[in-house]
Amino acid sequence: MDRLKAYVVGATGLVGQRYVQLLAEHPWFDLVGVAASERSAGRKYGEINWVLETPMPQKAAELRIDRLDVDSLPKVDVIFSALPSEVAARVEPEMARRGHMVVSNSSNMRLDPDVPLLIPEVNPDDLSLVKEQRARRGWSGFVIKKPNCSTTILDLPLKPILDEFGISRIHVATMQAVTGAGYAGVPSVAIIDNLIPYIKGEEEKIVNETRKIFRREIEIYATTTRVPVLDGHTEAVYVDTVRDFDVEAAAELMAKFRGVPQELGLPTAPPQPVIPIRALDRPQPRLDRMAGRGMSVVVGRIRKLAPKKLAFVALGHNTIRGAAGNAVLAAELSIKSGLY
Ligand SMILES: NC(=O)c1ccc[n+]([C@@H]2O[C@H](COP(=O)([O-])OP(=O)(O)OC[C@H]3O[C@@H](n4cnc5c(N)ncnc54)[C@H](OP(=O)(O)O)[C@@H]3O)[C@@H](O)[C@H]2O)c1
């Protein structure tokens, strides 16, 4: 396969930086350009406030930041978008209309019936919606969305449970990292030594997106909170199953769960997407968020509370599996599926 040209929009933010980090080492993509708002335009990428744990890739540091402008986009194969939703809502449809493959993190269009909301291991068949999207909207390109970070971290371990035992009801309480709110997101004085029991719009996203992804009107109740953790969303999950289960079998199903990305050996696919852990005091964000290079969800405290009542705690990296990593994997699957 020829190498593909990738362009990151919203490249200076927390998800944009993850894209740059993941694409710099990618075997299929060459990062040829980056764009952000007028605040950053014209500067060298090497001058931004890089916050990731590895050094900024040298090739990225040399790129000049473009001002985001749909009328003067470079000729590229894939646009990875990490824009605020209100900006994305304006520019992404226009990019797709002009023939680009757009893989996006923002929440606009996620619930549109002709837009794949993709967790590649969970609902790969939803890529077939792209055909309908192009036909209905008259676009030569297309838009693929990845779900909200907490939705992705919840739905991965639920998928094998849903397939084997059925699910009638889900209760989830999240403890979400500060990087989930973006670079300028949560002021330090609000979050240090504290917990904020409300994240605007987040609970509805978990409910509506999970129903779309599983194609079922499951009863879901969510409480989302922000905690003083840098990276890694933790979720306490309670599930009512349709059929009774054995707790060891539930853990084994999660451990053995594999999807199309693993079968195809896609570059960003973790060998094991869901990793059950036995230690009673795990998962913990600092210890477990980089499992599978940040692409695996670690699940602990797997318990049977009563017949047909399963409980567990899930943890995933919010800007890797919850954002840029899941989007890069979605792009890989789209390309391998012949969509581009
Ligand atoms: N953080 C997460 O864990 C996470 C997870 C899932 C989904 N998401 C979603 O992913 C998107 C990006 O999130 P983030 O956390 O990376 O946000 P962020 O840190 O605030 O970054 C936002 C990016 O968008 C750029 N931008 C802002 N206004 C713009 C404009 N008018 N024109 C062009 N570029 C503009 C910013 O550029 P400047 O630096 O020039 O302002 C920056 O590069 C959001 O839609 C968010 O909801 C985030």
Image (tube, grey):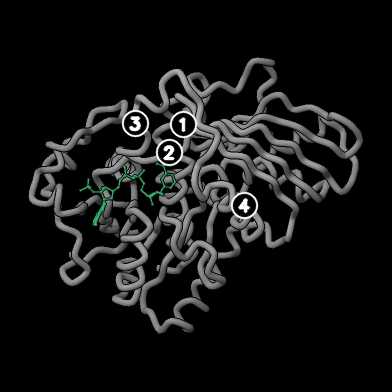
Q: Earlier in the sequence, mark 1 or mark 4?
A: 4
Tell me if the residue at label 1 has its CB under 8 Å from ligand 1: yes
Q: CA distance from mark 4 to mark 3?
A: 35 Å
Q: Which residue is mark 2?
A: 180
Please give left or right for residue 240 compared with residue 8 in the image: right
Which is more foreground, mark 2 or mark 4? Answer: 2
Decide which of tag 4 and tag 3 comes sooner along the chain: 4
- Mark number, residue 187: 3
Q: Depth-wise, is mark 3 or mark 1 nearer the camera?
A: 3
Q: CA distance from mark 3 to mark 2?
A: 13 Å
Identify the residue at horizontal 46%, vertical 31% (top origin): 177
Mark 4, mark 3: which one is toward the viewer?
A: 3
Kind of residue sitting beneath label 4: Val
Question: Which amino acid lies under the numbered mark 2 shown in the image of this protein?
Answer: Gly
Tell me which label, 3 or 1, sits earlier in the chain: 1
Distance of label 1 from label 4 (alpha carbons): 24 Å
Dot 3 lies on which element?
Answer: loop
- Dividing the picture into quadrants, the one containing residue 235 is top right
Dot 1 corresponds to which residue? 177
Q: Secondary structure at mark 1?
A: loop
Screen quadrant of the C terminus: bottom left
Q: Position of residue 221 (x, y in %)?
A: 69, 46
From the viewer's perspective, is residue 190 above or below residue 218? above
Provide the secondary structure element on which disc 2 rests: helix
Amino acid type at image mark 3: Pro
C-alpha gap between disc 3 and disc 1: 13 Å
Q: 334 or 155, which is in the foreground?
A: 155
Quarter of the image for the N terminus: give it.
bottom left
- Dot 2 or dot 4: first in sequence order is 4
Q: Which residue is mark 4?
A: 122
- The nearer-to-camera label among 1 and 4 is 1
